Structures are given as structure tokens and as C-alpha cells.
Amino acid sequence: MRIGVIAETKSPPDRRVPFAPEQLAELKNTYPDHDFVVQSSPVRCFTDKAYEDAGVEVRTGMSDCDVLFGVKEVETGQLIPGKTYFFFSHTGKEQPHNRAMLQEIAVRKITLVDYEYLTDHLHIRLVAFGRWAGIVGAYNGLRAYGERYRQYLLRPAHECRDFDEMKAELGKLTLQPIKILVTGGGRVAGGAMETLGCLDLKEVLPEAFLHESFEEAVVCRIDPWDYVRRKDREAVTLDHFFRHPGAYESIFKPYTKVTDLFIACHYWDPGSPVFMTTTDMREPDFHIRVIADVSCDINGPIPSTIRASTIANPFYGYDPWTESETPPFDLRSITVMAVDNLPGELPRDASEDFGKMLLEKVVPSLVEGDREGIIRRATMVREGELMADFEYLRNYLEGK
């Protein structure tokens, strides 16, 4: 088998890679009967020379590879017929902007394995960038708060060489007594708490966060049972919440009255209740003025997330009275951070972490045999045909 790492083609360019140079060198040593090559790229966080120095061949064409690994969606014209691709396709929720790509994958008889659906037998995801989205998202939230109130300036994460340099930047920071709220309990929220942990903030429980005052900055992380309840008043369980989101109603509103910085790291289903409405945001005692929406569900549970922002321009303002965008630090509006590719700000760390997961949990199934069905479960399209688990995409694929 010849396995290649392709150059990213999506614009704006993403500097992340699925495997760092040392990881490909390790794969070459572990599987000497297989070839591992890299397509030349001027934008990667690891240079072509770094791969060559690790003993990995760098080339322009990839047409003789059997399997191709990328990160983001592949430009339609760059798809090579008959190959097997691994990347985040962002088609599983019928995203309109990627329909043409999936259609071309079918036409060109390509096999698509989507990282998002690589799971173990308990359906737990095996590879993800979520931790790094949380790490950078929380940092950007702190940046936004400091700039809005002219209290401090933090260097953008993408100007830091790595996570260690970003943490050193946080070391310069002393927060005033504010209340920071984090929603979610998975990898993303864990990453956000990792960043906030660099500030040695006091972590408080929901009841104290809602009803007590503090003379120092505090953080509270809440789970679904803290912000939704079942309409029938039965106990909240994650499994039931994920399976029956329409059976719930929001109890989040009290948090909007006391939170200064809201870092949204939750999973949200379109059938779930929203966190807040525009009407809520117009109430005189609505207190949140900075929202770092790491989850970034456009026109979803948080009305102020009206579009994704970019690494270059991460902040914008939202006026709940006009329901329109304003300058990012207009004090009459809410400051929003809604970058949708946050791990790209620390591409070296994020890539090494992601590659480690692939190396340990996925590549053996690819090379040694998919005995546990890991790759089978994540295969959306095989040789141009939708797999049974993704048959629900039929109308989407056919443009109906």
C-alpha cells in the first residue's frame, strides 16, 4: 500500500496536517512493506524539508497512492478517481456548501472515510481536534474580553509558535473579579478548562455561581442537566438527551443574568432547546457581553452567532435590538468570537496530537485489517456508493 498525505486545498488555507514528520517516520519503521509519502505544500506548519529530514519522500503528484490522508474538505477538482480518502468532509449533516464535493466523490468512484465517524465499539470517537478548539477558543474569549474593556492585550494564538508560548502569554494576565461560564463536558470543554487552568482561577459550582459574589475571577463549567430539564420532569441523562432532544426545555436563563464571559463548548442538536433568545438578550438585566462560541452553530442556540469569524478577524459585534452585526467592541453590543477552525491557530500542537490518535487507533486497522470495524463504520462512500449507515444522505447526494 502507498499512503500519502495531501496538501490542503481549502481556502483560507489550513496549516494543520494529519501526521507530523516524526510520526510518518515512525510509520515507515513500523510498516516497512508500505510506502508513506507527502505532497509538497508551502503553507503547512511543518515544512517539506522537515519531512525530508525525517526520511519521508516529498513529491508533487499523488496519483500512484492508494490511500490519501488530509484534514479539511478537498477541492472538487483535486479529487483523484478511485482513491480512498480520509478527511473531515462536513457532509454528515447535509451541509449545503459541500454537496458538490460529495457528488463528485460519487462520480469519481472514490471511497471516503470521514474522521468524524471513526469510533470504537461503544461509539466513542477515536480522533478529533476538539481539545484544541477549546484551548484556543477560551484564549480568544479572554482576548476579546480584554480588548472590549481595554484592560489588557493578548497576542493572537496563531502568532505563538505553540501552546507553551501561548501559555506564557497567559502568564502576563491578571483578571478582575469576573464570572466565566463554560458549557459542555467533552473534549472541547476540557480544552477550554485547560486554558483557564493556566490562570489558577477558582472553580465554583453552579449554585454558587448563580447566587454568590466573589472578590476574584471565577469559572463554572455546567453540564446538560444544569441548563436543560425534561418537560415531563423525569431525571436528565445524557443518553436520553442525545436521543430525544425535543423532550427538553431550557433552564439556562438565570446564567445570562450573572455571567461576564460565556465560553460555549457544548454539543447542540437542532432539536434541542436554544440557550437564549433575542428577546432574552434585550432584557435590561441580561449581563453577558462577551460570547466565545467555540461550538459555532450558525443561527442556532445562541442568536448572536450569525456567522463564522476567521482566524485573521476573530471578533464581531451583535446588536440584539436590530439583530445585526456591529463593530466588535461597540459597548452597546455583544462581542462575539465564532472562529470555526480554532485548532488551526496552534497547528503544530493540534497536528501532533491528532496524528498520535491516528497512529495508535486507526492506522493499524487500515494496514493490519479492520477487525473491529473502525474504518467500516466511518466509510460514508465506498467506490462511489453510499454505505448503509449513510443512506439517509441519498436525497442530499442526489440534489433533491
Image: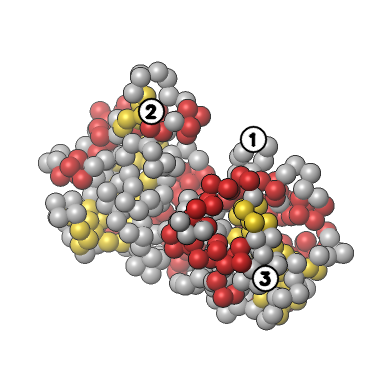
Choose between 139 and 87: the one closer to the eye: 87
Quadrant (top left, top right, bottom left, bottom right) of the C terminus? bottom left
Q: Residue at position x 68%, y 37% from top?
A: 121
- How many numbered marks, from 0 up? 3
Q: Residue at position x 67%, y 75% from top?
A: 39
Q: CA distance from mark 3 to mark 1?
A: 33 Å
Helix, strand or loop at label 3? It is loop
Disc 3 marks which residue? 81
Q: Earlier in the sequence, mark 1 or mark 2?
A: 1
Q: Residue at position x 55%, y 62% from top?
A: 102
Residue 240, given in percent of the width and then of the height, sits at 47, 27
Marks 3 and 1 in Cβ contact (< 8 Å) = no
Please say if 393 is above or below 384.
Answer: above
**Residue 122 numbered mark, or none:** 1
Please say if 287 is above or below 400.
Answer: above
Disc 2 marks which residue? 247
Q: Amino acid at mark 1?
A: Leu
Q: CA distance from mark 1 to mark 2?
A: 24 Å
